[in-house]
Structure formats: structure tokens, C-alpha cells
Image (cartoon, rainbow, N blue to C red):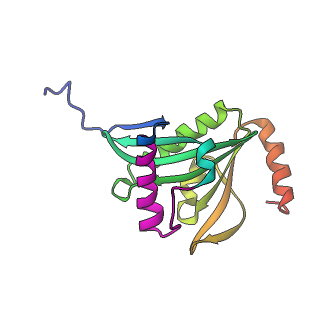
Amino acid sequence: MNALQRSDTPRIDVREVHSPEELEIIFQIRDEVFVREQALTPNARNDPDDKRSIHYLADFDGEPAGTGRVTMLGNEAQIAWVAVRKSRRGEGIGWRIMEVMIERSEEEGGEYIILNAQTHALRFYERLGFYSVGSVFTMANIPHQVMIHQLTPGGGETIRRYLESFGGR
């Protein structure tokens, strides 16, 4: 291989998946991160929203490395199950997954995105344009924070009404 053919820069490819085989890879990553590593849940495979969601799988140099899911509920996009294998964290995979899901949320007509972030990842989501809403809550002994990202000017009014339903920001 000559210098023109060689690339020392790892490639991150994020793709939407549909096949049972690809979904199984996603579930394996979820199991690895949320069941075994974090003990967040005993089962990361039976989320009822999975059937109506858009699933993404990220490959790092051709190997499955991360995943995420977006669920459209009218003008609201919900992002969940964002996970990167421990051995691949810090390499931009989570960032690329989020970029793809934010873009898709816009394409689907979302006015805003909502997610439950683990508090250790708040800065990561803030850099992507999310801001915290309400108080920190605990899920399976892991502190979480609801975060929102406005996608459209109309999304601001929707978010304002949403926040008012919870007593403000």
C-alpha cells in the first residue's frame, strides 16, 4: 500500500439500521454499556419505543462501536440509548452519532429534541446545543438530567409551554 492509499485517520461511519442482524448488534452494545458496565437496567432490549424509533449504528474503522436512537412524537424528537463501547470512548463516535440524530430530527420536522443525560455527560450535550431543564433525578443509582435542544424558532414557544408544565426551567 502506498502513501496515497494509506489513511492513519480512523473512519467513523454512522448509518440507520433496519435489519434484525443490525438491531442485534445495537442490542449487544446496549447490553455491554447499560446492563453490564453501568447496571442501569437488567434489560436493554425490550423498550416498547424501539419499534417506532430510528436506530443508528456507528462503526469505527469498520467495527461496531456505538449506537443511538431517535423517536419522533409529533414535533418532539426524543433521543435515547446513546452508547459507545468503553474501548472507543473519546474518539468522536458519540459526537458523530448525535450530529446524525440531530440532523434527522430536523429533517423529520422536529421543533425540539429532549433527552435524559447522565450527569457525567452534561458538558458533551451542552456543546451540542442542549440545555438542562429541571432538577437532577436518579435512575438506577445514576444521576440524570433532562436536556432540551431547540431546532426551530417555533420550537422555542413549544419548549416554553413544556417548561411551564413543569413549573419553569
> Residue at 47% of width from left, 68% of height from top?
38
41 inside magenta stretch: yes
In the shown orientation, is residue 63 left or right of residue 23?
Answer: left
* Along the viewing direction, whichever of 69 and 150 lies nearer the viewer: 69
Q: Residue 98, percent across and down?
A: 53, 44
**Quadrant for the C terminus in the image:** bottom right
> Residue at 20% of width from left, 24% of height from top?
4
**Quadrant for the N terminus in the image:** top left
* Along the viewing direction, whichever of 14 and 163 lies nearer the viewer: 14
Reply above or below: 133 against 74: below
Q: Residue 42, percent across and down?
A: 50, 67
Count of labels in the image: 0
Quadrant position of residue 101? top right
What stretch of residues is rendered in magenta? 22-46
In the shown orientation, is residue 22 left or right of residue 103?
Answer: left
In the shown orientation, is residue 145 left or right of residue 134?
Answer: left
Residue at far bottom of view: 141
State whether residue 112 appears in this view: yes
> Residue at 49% of width from left, 43% of height from top?
97
Quadrant position of residue 31? bottom left
In the shown orientation, is residue 135 left or right of residue 123?
Answer: right
* Along the viewing direction, whichever of 109 and 159 lies nearer the viewer: 109
Q: Residue 96, percent across and down?
A: 47, 41
State whether residue 92 appears in this view: no
52 inside magenta stretch: no
> Residue at 66% of width from left, 34% of height from top?
106
* Along the viewing direction, whichever of 87 and 126 lies nearer the viewer: 87
Secondary structure predominantly adopted by residues drawn in magenta:
helix
